[in-house]
Image (tube, coloured by chain):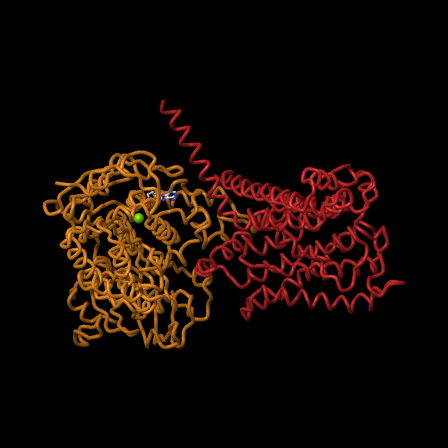
Chain colours: A orange, B red
């Protein structure tokens, strides 16, 4: 077998952390090679080295058997290596074609039409269904990703790197992407797929290199290795995919929403006549396709958005007139949907981020003066409990952490508040199975302590795994509320499209 | 780790200064002057003897306080271009006190400082309120406030502080009402400008540093400045902090006005917008918005300001060269990302060499 890419004994150090420690990766011609590892395992670093964004401290890289030095992305491109980054690099108000030929030698205006023709041909060849003349801001995230793929193909990339490509996609788009990948290898391309999602690996990958904490663990044949085994190798211990939990024992209502109407950013009703109750000791999951009013609902409850009409009560207190600080003090915890924008102050060290809701309270301050020792200890406790890893510990700037570790830090902070009502939006987004298992366990523990949890997730697995009841939302309305153990994914999936599946006698709303 | 970050921005500031000076030297050479001679007299002018050092400190005092004002607002993500207007109003309040308040000196100084603080703070709080309540951009509002202050002086000075001879400036304040102190003047070899303001500036720096690093207020202000969305989410009252930040920034510029009009000078001129209000932006930039950094950068700019006259007197280098140097330094500071890259690159190079040695 011929190796298109060989990365041998790669080492890369960042201040305080060895991101890659003697890692070897060998990719065969025409395969989909997965790299599996927890958040912060060093996957992106390894790929950045291959793509010329970082220089390895040690180790050699061979492309098609020949040793090469890749000093920058242009070198990588010349060698036929292309990469789709986690964050797309597209100009919003340019067309697909303009974006693809941007920065290409040969002139910008000159051959726009020929370029468009070629892009169309490529799009058809690989089943991408992209119109070369669409404007980027008009197309979905999934389509934008395909534009990034086209960009690589247009530059004659033979080795395609995908860094966690599914993190931003809907389940439907994920299926389509998998198909595209299959098409690509059929046409002779080789693919490196970075992910921590096992089912994706099972679905498309041929072989899988597993790394853990910067070290090479194993190279396995995907078809003959079970998901459980791969998960165990990635995390370093056995992983339970299903969280163990007792039947819920709901008691008094904690969150009480009545006839809520909320305007969305387009100034039309995003949440319509919505009523829901969440009791202490239960987890209620909101199922729905992204963009059906979940964001507006959560923002209305947490105070980030004003309501048009209706009422929201927490612990019997009407909070519609209260500001965010007061809501927090009543006992509201919130794992926000957008961790970069809302969840953390990226320039602040983790230490300060961990007390961002409590800094003014005892014991973290007294008479307006911060108590650094107490704050430090609290932050350290969260990082220890939730396994937040970073180069410089609690002194690391939050922005320096990998996405998964940022998420763990936020979840840890909110759980440590012991809020009577915890609103968890996509609490495990971007996390690997080990971390997901842990956070699911903590959420159930939170419930068992007699708190209420409102879970919003776009992943049905997670909804079913955690929720005691499921509230299904479609275009801002509550379609139905059902007990998890009395329904199934098909029914909920159908309800998510707006169809009420069962009669009123089965309804669980109280 | 904190140490590393600080030394980093220190190295960047230093690089900017060095490059600015080199550029200044090249300019001098280009107009046919001897750069070494030029710099010799530039620095001599600011540091030659104790008296000149006193003058340099006096020039720096105002710049430090304005720089502190700009950088404090900047910590909350606000751009205070209104330091000039805040200086004028703070200075006006101080001048009024100097003319009309007759109480024992220690108490008098307290009232003087309080008046300047309040005057500047009011001038700062208005743009803060406009921003918080109506989302008026603070750059627009502070510029507007500058001109309101400017024209107010046209009214207030002739109305209440009319001098005996001139229509263009206020009556001079009595020496014993000014911030000057005989012992200080003597200590600095008879410097006419050195005044108690430098102590005000030092105390202000310590206080601001303390507020930013150690208090819940500083925590909030920085959180709002770094990521207002996260601050909002966390329950921090963003608008309240915008107002407080502008109020404190205004107060600091007000103090600068006091130091300038009742310490460095002894009257207020009509129709002059104090340029230090804008120089403060440069001071804040070079000082990386860090109170200690502002102290040194204020001193450095003060040195250039007070040395340029001497350079011009002793050589044929025009004083504008000093301003060019300042501008170049600002330019280099603003593009400091490049320095950071450069020094990171040097550091990497060195560490690779070190590795190799270690390996053998
Ligand atoms: N530019 C950087 N500076 C410092 N540390 C970094 C940098 N990039 C990554 N790291 C650290 O290196 C480790 C590996 O990160 P990364 O390769 O992004 O992991 P993964 O992609 O597997 O989640 C993490 O601990 C991360 O915090
Ligand atoms: Mg990554």
Residue B141 sits in quarter = bottom right
Q: How many marks?
A: 0
Q: Nearer the viewer, residue A292 or A153?
A: A153
Quarter of the picture holding the N terminus of chain A: top left
- Residue B56 vertical position relative to residue A419 in the rendered view, above or below: above
State the residue at coordinates (34%, 74%): A270
- Measured from the top left, where is residue A297 in percent x and y? 35, 69
Whether residue A93 sits left or right of residue A488 in the image: it is right
Q: Is residue B55 above or below residue A321?
A: above
Which picture quadrant has residue B53? top right
Q: Nearer the viewer, residue B61 or A421?
A: B61
Where residue B87 appears, x then y in whole percent?
Answer: 70, 58
- Residue at image position (32%, 39%) is A19
- Determine the residue located farthest toward the left in the rendered image: A224
| Residue A39 image position (x, y, % from top left) | 29, 47
Q: Is residue B88 above or below residue B327?
A: below
Q: Is residue B72 left or right of residue B302?
A: left
């Amino acid at each position: 077998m011929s190796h298109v890419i060989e990365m041998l004994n790669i080492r890369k150090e960042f201040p305080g952390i060895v991101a890659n420690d003697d890692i070897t990766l060998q990719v065969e011609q025409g395969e989909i090679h997965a790299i599996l590892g927890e958040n912060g395992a060093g996957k992106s670093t390894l790929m950045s080295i291959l793509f010329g964004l970082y220089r390895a401290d040690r180790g050699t890289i061979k492309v098609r058997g020949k040793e090469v030095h890749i000093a920058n992305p242009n070198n990588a491109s010349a060698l036929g290596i292309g990469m789709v980054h986690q964050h797309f690099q597209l100009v919003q108000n340019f067309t697909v074609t303009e974006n693809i030929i941007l920065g290409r030698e040969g002139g910008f205006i000159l051959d726009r039409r020929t370029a468009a023709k070629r892009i169309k041909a490529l799009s058809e060849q690989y089943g991408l269904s992209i119109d070369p003349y669409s404007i980027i801001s008009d197309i979905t995230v999934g389509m934008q990703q395909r534009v990034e793929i086209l960009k690589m193909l247009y530059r004659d990339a033979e080795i395609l790197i995908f860094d966690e490509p599914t993190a931003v996609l809907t389940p439907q788009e994920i299926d389509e992407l998998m198909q595209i990948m299959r098409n690509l290898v059929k046409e002779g391309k080789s693919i490196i797929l970075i992910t921590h999602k096992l089912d994706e690996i099972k679905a498309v990958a041929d072989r899988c290199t597993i790394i853990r904490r910067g070290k090479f663990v194993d190279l396995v044949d995907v078809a003959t290795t079970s998901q459980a085994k791969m998960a165990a190798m990635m995390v370093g211990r056995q992983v339970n995919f299903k969280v163990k939990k007792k039947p819920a024992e709901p008691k008094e209502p904690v969150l009480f929403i009545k006839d809520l109407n909320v305007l969305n950013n387009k100034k039309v009703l995003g949440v319509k006549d919505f009523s829901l109750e969440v009791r202490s000791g239960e987890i209620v999951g909101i199922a729905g396709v992204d963009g059906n009013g979940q964001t507006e609902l959560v923002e209305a409850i947490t105070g980030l958005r004003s309501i048009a009409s209706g009422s929201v009560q927490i612990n019997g207190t009407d909070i519609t007139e209260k500001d965010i600080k007061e809501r927090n003090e009543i006992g509201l915890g919130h794992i926000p949907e957008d961790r970069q924008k809302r969840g953390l102050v990226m320039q602040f060290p983790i230490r300060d981020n961990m007390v961002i809701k409590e800094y003014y309270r005892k014991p973290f301050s007294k008479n307006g003066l911060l108590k650094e020792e107490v704050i430090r200890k609290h932050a350290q406790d969260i990082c220890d409990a939730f396994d937040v890893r970073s180069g410089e510990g609690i002194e690391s700037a939050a922005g320096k952490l990998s996405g998964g570790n940022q998420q763990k830090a936020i979840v840890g902070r909110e759980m440590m508040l012991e809020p009577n009502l915890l609103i968890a939006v996509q609490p495990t987004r971007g996390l690997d199975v080990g971390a997901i298992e842990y956070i699911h366990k903590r959420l159930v523990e939170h419930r068992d302590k007699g708190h209420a949890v409102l879970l919003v997730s776009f992943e049905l697995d997670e909804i079913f795994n955690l929720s005691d009841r499921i509230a299904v939302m479609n275009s801002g309305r509550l379609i139905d509320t059902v007990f998890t153990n009395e329904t199934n994914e098909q029914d909920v999936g159908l309800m998510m499209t707006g169809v009420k599946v069962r009669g009123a006698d089965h309804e669980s709303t109280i | 780790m904190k140490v590393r970050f600080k030394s980093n921005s220190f190295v960047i500031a230093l690089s900017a200064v060095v490059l600015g000076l080199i550029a200044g030297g090249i300019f001098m050479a280009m107009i046919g002057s001897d750069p070494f001679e030029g710099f010799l007299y530039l620095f001599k002018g600011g540091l030659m003897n104790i008296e000149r050092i006193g003058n340099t400190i006096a020039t720096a005092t105002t710049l430090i306080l304005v720089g502190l004002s700009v950088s404090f607002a900047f910590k909350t993500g606000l751009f205070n271009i209104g330091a000039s207007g805040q200086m004028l109003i703070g200075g006006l309040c101080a001048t009024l006190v100097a003319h009309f308040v007759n109480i024992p000196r220690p108490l008098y100084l307290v009232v003087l400082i309080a008046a300047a603080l309040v005057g500047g703070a009011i001038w700062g709080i208005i743009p803060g309120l406009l921003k918080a309540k109506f989302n008026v951009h603070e750059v627009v509002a502070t510029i507007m406030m500058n001109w309101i202050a400017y024209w107010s002086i046209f009214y207030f000075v002739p109305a209440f502080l009319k001098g005996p001879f001139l229509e263009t400036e206020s009556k001079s304040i009595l020496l014993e009402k000014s911030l000057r102190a005989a012992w200080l003047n003597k200590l600095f070899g008879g410097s006419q400008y050195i005044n108690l303001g430098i102590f005000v500036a030092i105390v202000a720096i310590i206080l601001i540093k303390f507020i930013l690093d150690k208090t819940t207020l500083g925590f909030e202000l920085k959180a709002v400045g770094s990521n207002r969305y996260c601050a909002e989410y966390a329950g921090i009252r963003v608008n309240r902090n915008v107002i407080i930040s502008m109020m404190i920034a205004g107060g600091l510029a007000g103090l600068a006005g006091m130091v300038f009009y009742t310490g460095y000078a002894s009257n207020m001129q009509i129709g002059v917008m104090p340029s230090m209000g804008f120089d403060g932006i440069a001071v804040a930039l070079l000082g990386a918005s860090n109170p200690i950094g502002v102290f040194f950068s204020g001193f450095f700019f003060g040195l250039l300001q007070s040395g340029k006259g001497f350079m011009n007197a002793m050589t044929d280098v025009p004083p504008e060269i000093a301003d060019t140097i300042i501008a170049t330094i600002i330019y280099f500071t603003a593009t400091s990302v490049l320095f950071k890259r450069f020094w990171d690159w040097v550091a990497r190079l060195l560490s690779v060499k070190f590795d190799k040695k270690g390996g053998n």
